[in-house]
Amino acid sequence: MFQLAYYEPQTLKEALQMDGVKKGTGKFLAGGTDLLVQIKRRKIEPQELINLKAIPELKGVQETGDGGIRIGAAVTVKGIMESSLILAGYPAMAQAAKELGTPQVRNRATIGGNIVNASPAADLVGPLLVYDAILLLTSESVQRRVKIEDFLLGPSQTALGKEEVLEAIELPALPAGTGAVYLKHGLRKTHEIALVGVSIALRSDGQGVIEDCRIALTAVAPKVIRAREAEDALKGCHLDDETLSRVAHIAEANCLPISDVRASADYRRQMVGVLTKRGLLSLGGSN
Amino acid sequence: MNYQTVGHGLVKIDVMEKVTGTAPYVDDLVMPGMLIGKVLRSPYPHAAIKRIKIEKAQALNGVKAVITNQDTPRVKWNSAGFPPSQGAILVEDQYILTDRARFVGDGVAAVAAVDEKTAQLALDLIEIEYEKLPHVLGQDKAMEPEAPIIHEGVEKNIVGHLPIVIGDVEQGFKEADFIFIDKYTCQRVNQVSIEPCGAVVALYDANGRLNLWTSTQMPHLVRRIVARAMDMPVGKVRLIKPHVGGGFGSRLGAVNEPIAAMLSKATGKPVKLIYSREESFVGSESRHPIIMELKTGVKKDGTFTARQMTAYIDAGAYATHTPSFAGPVGGWFLAMYKSPNVKYDGYSIYTNTPPCGAFRGYGNPQVVWAVESQVDEIAERLGLDPREIRLRNHPCKGEVWAWSGWEIESCGLEEAIERGSQSIGWENRIRQGSNTKENSNQGQETVHKVGPETKKKGIGMAYMMHVSGARPMLHETGSAFIKMNEDGSVNVVYSSSDCGQGSSTALSQIAAEELGLPINMVHITQFADTDTAPFDIGSHASRQIYSGGNAVKVAAGIVKKQVLEHAATMLEVSASDLAIENGQIICLQDETKTKSVAEVAYNALYGTNGFEISGVASLEPPGNPPVYAAQFVEVEVDTETGIVKVIKVAAAHDVGTAINPVCVEGQIEGAVQQGLGYALTEEMVFDEMGRLQNPNLTDYKILTVKDMPEIDSIVVQAASQTGPFGAKSVGESGLVPTAAAVGNAIYDALGIRIKDLPITPEKVLGLLKAKS
Amino acid sequence: MNKDISLVVNGEARYINVPADKTLLDMIREDLNLKGTKKGCDAGDCGACTVLLDAEPVNSCLVLAVEAANKEVTTIEGLAKGGELHPIQAAFIKHGAVQCGFCTPGMVLAAKAILDKNPNPSVEEIKEGIAGNFCRCTGYKKIVDAVLASGRNIQG
């Protein structure tokens, strides 16, 4: 590493006024589990690190007035995993948190970091997509709300402005009877970067007819994506074998995987189908 | 046999230091004025260095030395750790820093600076003009006529060809009822000791002696190699080995000691050179990928008429171990099954990748992977129980073992197969194809609500034989010096190369047993120091207990004799009437005549004509008794994802007398983790430009605690005749048969046979698709 | 840029001047001269550098030293008290859970974090808790046995 300045602003305002933010030479530091590795490998060379952990607005998981929740961007992955509000209302998030990295990493890594890194393999992002998360982006002058789907642009690319910080994540209330799941596929049982992840939120009526469905696919496109055609194909159907394999195939067609050291594109595509089917089955069973 | 110390799972001698964090490893050493070294590596797989400019780096404040190929001694050397021997074929083809990069990561320059940051900045300031040369990856491609030549004069990049012929295989194939022809391949894997490989502090002192504190498995041989590379006399090099954070073969030779030595010589300061995890992947030697062509002739009754293997071994960019390594590869092959006709050809082939070298098992895991997969197929074709074909064809006690040419002293294979079978539930095994395995172990998780038809279980087994030392391929001199202190305790001075396996503990137990002393009266050197410890060729070939133990036992015997003779004088009895039990001299005839060993030692040292009771033994071991193992594996394969879950490994190992059974189990259990990784998840992946794609522990996948199956380590003790207290070996064998057993279990589950390691989910699905 | 920080290391208050880009691991090893915390990858993968930061296990290679200001750090050197081994250390010895020893300090601290929260963890909970610590020597079996047994010991 090299000469680097370090700041711990106590308020959001203070953070946003930092020179490093204004000049674009600084980096926000939250968990550091990705950032410090990037710095050590000399992929990035910031001049200032601005630690966001002390900022009150970025902390905590709270209920919002309208039945949803607000998660501070600096909440750790472990915090997500153990939050009673998240466990009760958004279990696929807790599940994804539990499958991210190792205990040591989960103690440090934050939800904000997981989103802003914009890795196509980010574990928390799939569930955020199917829960229709809204991101609260704050700059010195403006605060805006952006749907997570619109926020993610590509690998390491987001709609975050140069002078903006991701302050919080809002998850809207879910209609009663919505079930959700995150399935992660890797070679090992832990300590994996997802080869493929499938997140599903599903609501069916009393007769088992799917009323609403959202599917997100992880690590099979330049960013975590929604499988809209697969979702549409499900609506109005029962979860029978024919529907399952049809939807699984559509999901496979919905993705754009690459081949890399972790897996081939073909295998990833195939796993999208398998995981989609398995995810739907697990939710079908729970209704 | 009942022993006082041998055979007991005593607490290891180094654990107090290790659990409290006080055990020093190389990176923990700090010396006054110490500099930090760093190596600049080639970004190209094959390139000549046209020009190299170091002035800017030299000018940087805090930089004390910048060295390149021009500074290296003009001797070519070989980094592999071999004693000069008939079986050691040493092709000397490297310089300490190269003037022609032959793989991505080849060291081209090095710096020493006041701290790591400065050293890194200095590397950035070195300007190199490369001339890119065509490169070649893969040993099959490197042998093609149009392939670029990696070392001048080495045609088709074949740096070695080692043939073995016994009988006449062509005749044997004529006599066969069936002939099986297969090609098996395996990947490159890394040892991944948790202490990264490549850790040294060098001090070229004012007396012109080179002192090295290094994490090594072979103190004396690395001293020799460094002396050669530095072009200096062996006696001017002193090597000290502190604790070693895992070896597994990676430290079987010089790693970065010569670079640190040059930097220290250039600066006159101690220089620490510690490789990062990434560097340890490319800057040290990994397991050889081998393409193995097998042809086996077999009678209907399952006996072999002819066995043939051609092995194409990827040496990487420098010869190091490989031309010699081709010998044991042939040895494992020809010696594991009896056959009147055997033919082996081992080709060592240069490629533009990091050099390959020693990794636990030294070629045997590769060979056993191929042979035991094929034998499984042969058994099925002949309708034989897979266990039966092994029992019919393995060399047994009293027969000559082709690896060594010596008679086999003991064989525990039958017992191993029997007990392993029971542990895994072999009798309940349902042959492949039936696929309705509700049978064996309960408690399987249903991960998701998928139909049970997506999970298939299978059981497989594989067998292996391995060495207890390096003879007769290598001269295997080992030595121990034991001296008795005035309190009756002894110092065992041994050139320890314990890397955590517990060999120092077991050697202490051997000394204690032989001397009749309690274990707490034996103090063994934990740090080898070549200035004071007698010569030993190190920790490899699973030789520490059989061979090192032999030296320790002989030295202890000399000490014991002196103790008894001196006690006899003191007690005025005949030495032949005396014995030592638990630190006490007892007279078999007259129990009133007794002395403590302490009294005898004190009297020897301070009595009339004082002398220190001591003994030294320096010799080659009497033989090389083979060990046997049978491993049984149960798997559950997800037929939709291709993921293979290993449910259980029953690893039955004949180790001879287990000097310390807890350490023996630890060796087996740890090896199984490496064996399963070899089978399923571990692989060094290079891109087309020869760049390693996964030099980190996220994408190079060693197994976590959650991936490990139940392991039943079954210790079979068919005592050898020549080993200390009947010991043979255990160090390497635990991972040798694992991959083949996994492959055979997958075949049992699915009816598909994968012939290239690792068995990835994609390969499983590919073959399943092809089958249906 | 250097910063003055104060923190508590193994129960003792320490005041250190560190560069902002120094990791907690390097500060522990170089400035505090506590060599028991090991560097196995420097990338948060292997767990050998695990320490407890305010009682939570972290990879000290992925924490900046300045981030530890005003916090409590426990390293392997802080476990044995008055010459008495911590029960986890004793169990590692008794069960043969130590081989090369390079993963041991981190492993012991990861185990301590498990047992501090739940003195009687299940095998599954133990595996979950040490899943971020690689061992290449033992196959983990005797390590799990040791943690299981020390759980019982701590409970009395």
Image: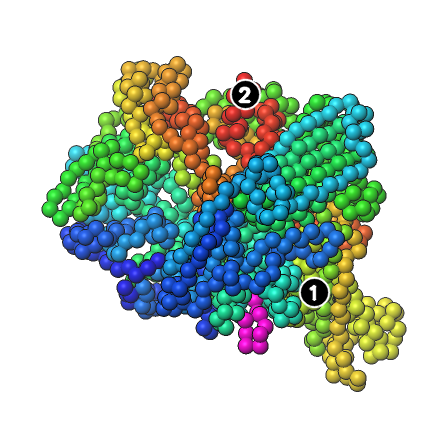
Q: Is residue B209 magenta?
A: yes
Q: Nearer the viewer, residue A124 or B488?
A: A124
Locate residue A193 relative to residue B714 in the image: left or right: left
Locate residue A86 relative to residue B557 in the image: left or right: left
Quadrant of the rendering where the C terminus of chain A is positioned: top left
Q: Amino acid at mark 1?
A: Phe
Q: Residues within 10 Å of mark 1 (few under 14, many from 20)?
A: many
The correct choice, above or below, for A202 with respect to A207 in the image is below
Residue B535: give its label: 1
Q: Quadrant of residue B504?
A: bottom right
The x and y percentages for residue B596 are 75, 74
Q: Is residue B446 magenta?
A: no
Where disc 1 sits, the SS reads loop
The residue segment tinted magenta is B204-212
Chain on which label 1 sits: B
The x and y percentages for residue C97 are 56, 53
Quadrant of the rendering where the N terminus of chain A is positioned: bottom left
Residue reaching furthest to the bottom: B608
Q: Disc 2 designates what residue? A: B770
**Residue occupying image coordinates x 74% and y 77%:** B612
Q: Is the same chain shared between marks 2 and 1?
A: yes
The x and y percentages for residue B76 are 60, 58
